[in-house]
Amino acid sequence: MDLLTTAKLLEQRQINLVSLRENIDTTTATGRCFLSMMGAIHQMERELRAERAAAGRSSAKARGKTGGRPKTAPKNWKMPESYMKTLIKQPPKFVKLLE
């Protein structure tokens, strides 16, 4: 739910927003105007952030970069034999060998 819808719902229930720190009072025309402007600025920031993210993804794609998780090893990939021997001789502490 957005800011203006919430403010309107509260107003219908005769609940007024008063912020002492920011000096916003929705019972006055100035307070309602300020609340509307803050909502518009917030919406603009959200849209700009989405546009920048899309532009960044597009730029990365043009450079051949892809996002997301790193790819796992291919299915035909085999662990080097020397590494396997090391693992068998000295397994990591979290591995329990089944016999």
Image: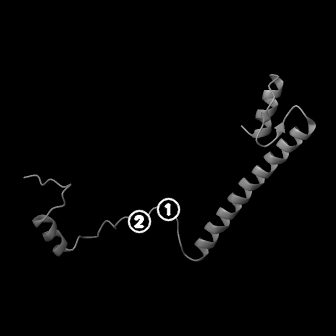
Labelled pair 1, 2 in contact (Cβ < 8 Å): no
Residue 51, horizontal then vertical, whole percent = 71, 61
Position of residue 86 in the picture relative to residue 20 (left or right): left
Position of residue 26 in the picture relative to residue 91 (left or right): right
Q: Which residue is mark 1?
A: 68
Q: Residue at x 12, y 64 (%)?
A: 88
**What amino acid type should be assigned to the residue bearing mark 2?**
Lys
Asked if 20 appears above or below 62 in the picture, the reply is: above
The one of 65 and 52 positioned closer to us in this rendering: 52
Q: Residue at x 75, y 50 (%)?
A: 42
Element type where label 1 sits in the image: loop
The one of 81 and 74 positioned closer to us in this rendering: 81
Q: Residue at x 71, y 53 (%)?
A: 46
- In three-dimensional space, the C-alpha distance between marks 1 and 2, rounded to whole angstroms, equals 9 Å
Position of residue 35 in the picture relative to residue 48 (left or right): right
Looking at the rendering, in which quadrant would you find the N terminus? top right
Q: Residue at x 61, y 66 (%)?
A: 57
Residue 83, horizontal then vertical, whole percent = 19, 72
Q: Which residue is mark 2?
A: 71
Residue 52, horizontal then vertical, whole percent = 68, 64
The one of 5 and 35 positioned closer to us in this rendering: 35
Element type where label 2 sits in the image: loop
Mark 2 is surrounded, within 10 Å at the Cα level, by few (under 14), some (14 to 19) or many (20 or more) other residues, namely few
